[in-house]
Image: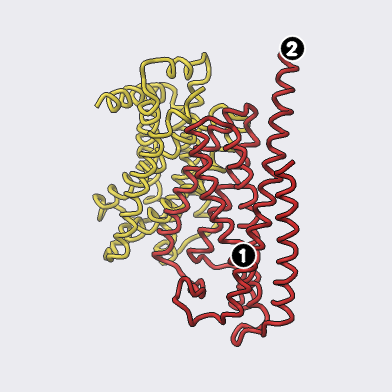
Amino acid sequence: MTRERVSIGLALAAALLLSYDLYQMFMVLPDEALQGAIYRILFFHAPAAIVGMIGYFAALTFSILYLSSGILRWDSLSASIIEVSLVFSCVNIVTGSIWARIIWGIWWTWDYRLTSALVCVLIFAGYLMMRRAIEEPTQRARLSSALCIFGCVDVVIVWKSIEWFRNNHPSPVLSIRTGGGTMDPAMERIFYLNFLAILMIAIALVLIRTRQEAIAREVDSLRRFANAV
Amino acid sequence: MRTIGQALAVARKDLAVELRTKESFNAAGAFAISILLLFSFAFDPSPEMLHQIAGGLLWLVFAFAGALIFNRGFARELPNECLDALLASPLSSGSLLLGKAIANFTMLIALEVVSLVVFGIFYNVAWTFRAGELAIVFLLATWGIAIVGAAFGAMTVNLRLRELMLPVIIYPLLIPLLIAAIELTDVVLYSKQITPDQLLWGRILLAFDIVFTALAVALAETILVN
């Protein structure tokens, strides 16, 4: 019950914050000098990428926790986080493609960030497919956790390997990366607020998915019990 | 040392079975040669074009044909509960996985040699000028593919749709290794000068091999528990 209240509270807070952000983005902030109106996609594109990445590494932590403790709840949490992160990674890729089409004139280029984002999606889509293919909950949790560890390590290697040979992606603009002077403070404030809103949506979705996973686990154990009887 | 000894015993067993039946090697070899043939007809590459695509073509062939070998690695232990017997034996999980990887590696290297000869003939490419460097690239990249293939072959052995799941999972994981192998093969095959930037690809291959071998051995128990 508490979890439901938290997820509803988070979703409501995210909706309010998102409404404020949208108002600021479209009614208050001016167009960017070089890119025009399309720069606003950045407010969704980059936060979605960051939330996705945070999710994958949070899932890695919970996978390791599952392997060390054997508690299925950690595995459910890991799977829920990966599902939600995958959605945000797809949002990141789609919004990036729309931006690239307008600014560069192409939908896609084999830049290291784009490639590593796509590899991430492919690896964790494989993770979800593998989960669907395993009936037995303990085996599913064990193998999924192992795959999550392999996947996260691979994402780091992909990032480093592609970084060395291809990079068209714009450089970081946030003041925490550059020390300031690259992005208007008013725009940066909305960026952080939107990041917060998207993070809250992600956490609310994870809580909902974890609850569904727990119910599915319960149904599954009841079915097994009924079959055994 | 004991782990290595056990791994070699498993690899010897797998290779002896393969030598008798040739079920994986024949299928993978025929598949590799078919792809080489189809590429030639599909793109009719000029010598200049071949300079750009040779490495990619070879490593795609090896990766695709390799999946046929990896699928059989653990699946051949399923009839008569041989896998359960292996797990119940005093073998450690790590040595079982390493043994399967060594067998995969040997079969894949044999397949690569055959494919390289066919590639040289079909595409009129002399690949023997820097055979030593080419061998180093092939050995490093093939071990990476073999260890990932063995780990995920073990993971998917009891799954429904095993043959479909294995490629879906391993190809995205192999992307950094394949990129590095393609870059280095292109450089060595066409006797280009190796630049410091390209040496980084060698480090990627080495890092991939070390990290994934360590991970596979560390997680062997988790992957193989039945």
Q: What is the count of numbered marks? A: 2
Q: Nearer the viewer, mark 2 or mark 1?
A: 1
x, y percent for residue A57: 51, 50
Give the spatial CA distance, label 2 vs label 1: 51 Å
Percent of width and height locating residue A102: 64, 77
Q: Is residue A67 above or below residue B43?
A: above
Give the residue at mark 2. A229
Residue nearer the viewer, A148 or B80: A148
Rendered yellow, the chain in question is: B
Q: In the image, B157: left or right of A44?
A: left
Q: Quadrant of the N terminus of chain A?
A: top right
Q: Is residue B21 something one can see in this rendering?
A: yes
Residue placed at 48% from the left, 21% from the top?
A: B77
Image vertical order of residue A41 relative to residue A2, above or below: below
Q: Amino acid at mark 2?
A: Val
Comparing B18 with A44, the one in front is A44
Element assignment for label 1: helix
Residue plotted at (60% across, 73% down): A100
How would you rate the neighbour count of disc 1 (Cα within 10 Å): few for under 14, some for 14-19, many for 20 or more? Answer: many
Query: Residue visible at 73% across and 23% down?
Result: A222
Residue type at mark 1: give it: Phe
Q: Which residue is mark 1?
A: A195
